[in-house]
Amino acid sequence: MSMVRYSMPAAHPCLAGHFPGRPLVPGVVLLDAVFSAITAAGHGTVARLRHAKFVAPVGPEQPVEISLTDPGAGRIAFRCLCAGALALSGEVELASP
């Protein structure tokens, strides 16, 4: 298992429209952070998102802990915790070597 920390700066341009008055980190940005963490941890590249469940919103500058586990068969499971609560979980398939 490996763990990576991520947070989005409050000045990031995507936050201006997502959403005015209550900025939230877009789900696609969180998934990109997960995919980058998978690659950085040496697991290879993501070929397909098998499933993802967004459970709680993440705001700008909130630290997110991305935990990765290897269930085998060319897959990586992930969990993203924000302030100790689950924000996102799911699983990806890795590209064949």
Image (cartoon, rainbow, N blue to C red):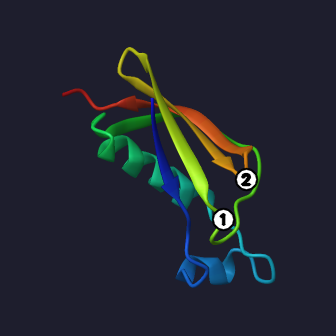
Residue count near mark 2 (Cα–Cα under 10 Å), binned few <14, some 14–19, many ≥20 = few
Q: Quadrant of residue 41?
A: top left
Q: In this orientation, which residue lies closer to the viewer: 46 or 67?
A: 67
Place of residue 92 in the rendered image (x, y in percent of width and height, measured from the top left): 46, 32
Residue shown at 70%/67% (left/top)?
A: 59
Q: Secondary structure at mark 2?
A: loop
Place of residue 87 in the rendered image (x, y in percent of width and height, measured from the top left): 70, 47
Along the polypeptide, which appears first: circle 1 or circle 2?
A: 1
Residue shown at 56%/64% (left/top)?
A: 7
Would residue 92 be found to the left or right of residue 83 on screen? left
- Seen in the picture, residue 12 relative to 85 is either above or below; the reply is below
Examine the rendering and report whether any part of residue 70 can be seen. Answer: yes
Q: In this orientation, which residue lies closer to the viewer: 6 or 31?
A: 6
State the mark number for residue 83: 2
Would residue 62 be found to the left or right of residue 48 on screen? right
Q: Secondary structure at mark 1?
A: loop
Q: Residue type at mark 2?
A: Ala
Q: Give the CA separation, mark 1 to mark 2.
A: 8 Å
Q: Are marks 1 and 2 in contact (CB under 8 Å)?
A: yes
Residue shown at 30%/40% (left/top)?
A: 45
Q: Quadrant of the C terminus?
A: top left
Q: In this orientation, which residue lies closer to the viewer: 55 or 7?
A: 7
State the mark number for residue 62: 1
Q: Residue type at mark 1?
A: Gln
Q: Quadrant of the N terminus?
A: top left
Place of residue 70 in the rendered image (x, y in percent of width and height, measured from the top left): 43, 23
- Seen in the picture, residue 88 relative to 72 is either above or below; the reply is below
Q: Residue furthest top?
A: 73
Place of residue 75 in the rendered image (x, y in percent of width and height, measured from the top left): 41, 24
